[in-house]
Amino acid sequence: MAKALDSERAAIAADEERLAERRRKLAEREREAALAVLDKAGILKLPLDTIEALAAQVKKLGIEALTKKLAA
């Protein structure tokens, strides 16, 4: 009985490791997709100081408020 429980724990641990790896790869693909969207919009072609200023404004205003202002 104990051996079966140990085997089950080992199988669950292996499944968790595979799932963690899948999540890591998904996060990496999402980041790459986000960067591709920013690049397509021309944002990545801006000077670094302009990108930093833009990021500071996004952080200051928040995404919802900024989206609302841009839509107006």
Image (cartoon, grey):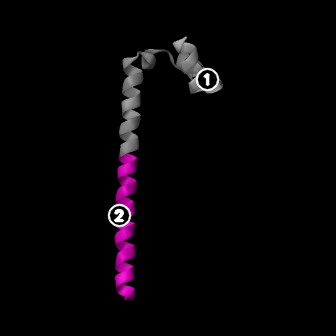
SS for dot 2: helix
x and y, in percent, of residue 32 in the image: 37, 33
- Residue 42 higher or lower than 35, as above or below: above
Say which amino acid is labelled 2. Answer: Asp
Quadrant containing the N terminus in the rendered view:
bottom left
* Residue name at image x 41 percent, y 30 percent: 34
* Residue name at image x 34 percent, y 78 percent: 7
Residue in the foreground of this view, choosing between 67 and 45? 67
Residue in the foreground of this view, choosing between 24 and 67? 67
Distance CA(mark 2)–CA(mark 1): 40 Å
Magenta stretch containing residue 19, yes or no?
A: yes
x and y, in percent, of residue 22 in the image: 35, 51
Q: Residues within 10 Å of mark 2 (few under 14, many from 20)?
A: few
Q: Earlier in the sequence, mark 2 or mark 1?
A: 2
Quadrant containing the C terminus in the rendered view:
top right
- Disc tally is 2
Say which amino acid is labelled 1. Answer: Ala
Res 15 label: 2
- Residue 27 higher or lower than 20, as above or below: above
